[in-house]
Amino acid sequence: MMVIPAIDIMDGQVVRLTQGDEESRINYGNSRSPLDVARHWVEEGAEYLHVIDLDATLGRGDNSGLVQEIVNDLSIPIQVGGGIRSLESAQTLLGKGVDRIILGSLAIKSPELVSGLCEENGKDRIVIALDHKQGIVLDKGWKESTGKPLCDALRDFISLGLRWFLITDTSRDGTLEGPDTETYSKVSRHASIIASGGVGSLGDIGTLLGTGVKAIVVGKALYEGVFTLPEAIRCVEA
């Protein structure tokens, strides 16, 4: 299992939100650029990064230049998400050195299109974001319910040939209250799962090890200094 530091960018700064609420925004860059933060995580031992453009997610601008700086500068692979709402934008990112793209609304709206994108570029380059609350998949930056159960959505995407899924329990995101291990244990039997949301201790990481997920995205716990990235990596490798 891999530990992946999260870099969420809003207004050109590295931030964290709690449960997707903009009012909860905390800036963590300490005057450092997103690129500087990314370099810091590499120095700490990161082998992969998770970069999200929150402005693009919210449809009010983008930080694509900053994201591309990170991709161009670092030698480690990066997965990028946020506001990828067309085939053209997806292909552009894949052609500019991004290892994996994360698709949410586009996948929910046009699953067959995303399946074709997967066939063309390879199953390991497309990640489907399934954000849920109480087991129901959300859309539009977590603002709208699709009414579809998580397990049903997962099954449908798997039937279309998708392999990788980023699953976030939005009620836990940014809370440090612990991950939804029960759900991860269920779904990881059927696909390659990246867990996200709620990690608040090294014990949580140890618990996730037993669920079968392939990776965990960690944000606030690292930025708040609950534990360090080297400590998290040692926990996984122990």
Image: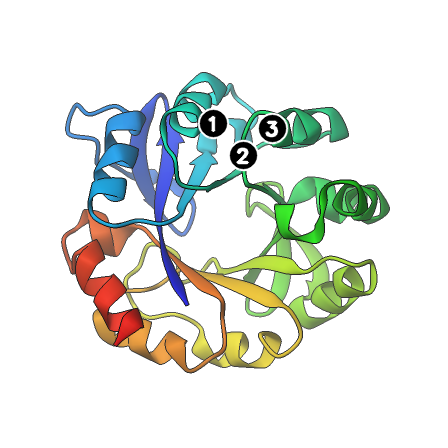
Pair 3/1: label in front: 3
Q: What type is the residue that disc 1 sits on?
A: Asp
What residue is shown at x 44% (from left), y 77% (from top)?
181
Q: Is residue 156 above or below residue 49?
A: below
Which residue is disc 2 drawn over?
A: 98
The picture places residue 194, in percent across and down from the top left corner, at 50, 61
Q: Nearer the N terminus, badge 2 or badge 3? A: 3
Which residue is disc 3 drawn over?
A: 93
Within 10 Å of disc 2 (Cα), the crowding (few <14, some 14-19, many 20+) is some
Q: Is residue 175 above or below residue 73?
A: below
Q: Nearer the N terminus, badge 3 or badge 1? A: 1
Tag 1 secondary structure: helix
Q: Which quarter of the rendering shows the C terminus?
A: bottom left
Hey, which quadrant is residue 178 in on the image? bottom left
The picture places residue 173, in percent across and down from the top left corner, at 39, 56
Tag 2 secondary structure: loop
Q: Is residue 117 left or right of residue 208?
A: right
Q: Nearer the N terminus, badge 1 or badge 2? A: 1
Q: Is residue 117 left or right of residue 223?
A: right
What residue is shown at x 26% (from left), y 63% (from top)?
233
Q: Is residue 190 left or right of residue 175?
A: right
Hey, which quadrant is residue 82 in on the image? top right
Q: Are marks 3 and 1 in contact (CB under 8 Å)?
A: no
Residue 236 visible to an observer of this rendering: yes
Q: CA distance from mark 2 to mark 3?
A: 6 Å
Q: Foreground: 31 or 148?
A: 31
Residue 127 visible to an observer of this rendering: no
The picture places residue 41, in percent across and down from the top left corner, at 25, 43
Within 10 Å of disc 1 (Cα), the crowding (few <14, some 14-19, many 20+) is some
Q: Which quarter of the rendering shows the N terminus?
A: bottom left
**Picture disc at residue 55:** 1
